[in-house]
Image (cartoon, rainbow, N blue to C red):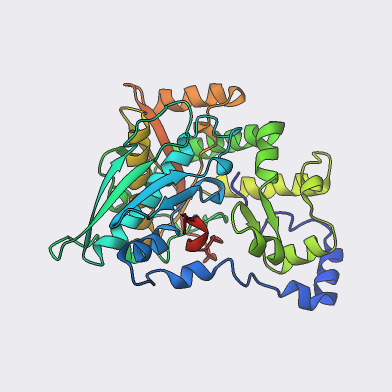
Amino acid sequence: MPLSRRKTLALIGGGVILAATGSLGAIATRQPRTALLPWGQAGLGEDARHRALSWALLAPNPHNRQPWLVDLREPGVVTLYVDTAKLLPHTDPYSRQITIGLGCFLELMRMAASHGGQRVTITPFPEGFDDRALDGRPVARAVFTADAGVTADPLFPHALARRSNKEPYDLARPLPEDTLEKLAVADTARFGGTLDAKEVADWRAFTREALRIEIETPHTFKESVDLFRIGRAEVDANPDGIDFTGPLFEVLGATGLMTREASLDTSSQAYKAGLDAVYANTDTAMGHVWLVTVGNSRPDQIATGADWLRVNLAATGAGVAFQPLSQALQEYPEMAKLYADLHARLAQEGGTVQMLARIGYGPEVAPSPRWPLETKILNA
């Protein structure tokens, strides 16, 4: 569930919150102490694999679950596994989106290695796979080889600035006509998009409806709410999931005005204000982009992740804000009609719509929290 962290619940309590913020100044100004440290440690380490992995940690992934685990016992090799405790069984029942996130991780690792004179050869699912579920078999085996002639990927320098920008975009700033051309950097999937005002208005309504369905479906909404991290202490203790930090949320958390239990109460003012806030995101899209693949196997999804990271980095390089809107792509019964409608629009000749995002100009936002690398290495 994409949430506007600065707008969500901003109307709740009105003057009460403003007064509380003033009286609880020390609490209101607290910021995470450790959850953002990996962004400043990218590229550190003596081993080429550690350096590349410290960048890979920063890859986009659904609900910021960071589902990657790596085995480094084989010299010069990274074996990637999925942490099955980090899956999203309600919104992503076949782990298609999780697999795409793992593809983003592998691609950012490969990019980082290329800037260190390392060629990375990736074999996805070397022991096979199940298209219906992820399991304990390796997701990929990546072999690092020193190669002074490897081409450094030109998109990599945008990695530290890359964001999934979950704030309303500027309705007064249209995107330049060549924006889609700049973002058409996918290697395997078919890239598409629109900046046409009429089409964008239609997609705004469509993505709003998909978001409504996800929020109003109890089991999918609860999956998101269970992953809320409210305030600095929770984010530092568990730097994945959906983070709420900053003065407003520090006070809301400290005073008990924002809790996971209250967020599930559909009759509450918190819930209603939250709806208005998240709709402000879909309703301010200034363009939309998508990826469509012919196949939908696990290796196809890994390749999609590489393409999606590339598109996100290209948007960053162009100064364009970018937020995935994956609700209509989710494969649970309540979303079936919109899923079919989406494919009828974008995959008329067959295939799978793998990703959909809104683009525009948005405010500067902070990076998402990350677990440190040492917590993701098996047998360390």
Q: How many marks?
A: 0
Foreground residue, 26 or 8?
A: 26
Above or below for 229 versus 299: below
Report whether 310 appears left or right of 68.
left
* Most distant residue in the left direction: 149
| Position in image of residue 326 (x %, y %) | 51, 39
Specify whether 175 is left or right of 64. left
- Picture residue at 52% right of the left edge, 55% below the top: 171
Pinpoint residue 161: horizontal percent, then vertical percent. 42, 66
Depicted 355 relative to depicted 284: above or below: above
Q: Position of residue 302 (x, y in %)?
A: 36, 40
Q: Is residue 26 visible?
A: yes
136, 336: nearer the viewer: 136
Left or right of residue 56, residue 8 in this image: right
| Up/down of 225 relative to 76, above or below | above
Q: Quadrant of residue 29?
A: bottom right
Residue name at image x 37 percent, y 64 percent: 50
Place of residue 352 in the rendered image (x, y in percent of width and height, measured from the top left) = 38, 28
Q: Quadrant of residue 140?
A: top left
Q: Residue at x 46, y 52 (%)?
A: 60
Instruction: Tell me the quadrant of the picture where the N terminus can be found.
Output: top right
Q: Nearer the viewer, residue 300 or 116?
A: 116
Whether residue 319 appears in this view of the structure is: no
Residue visible at 34% across and 34% down in the picture:
127
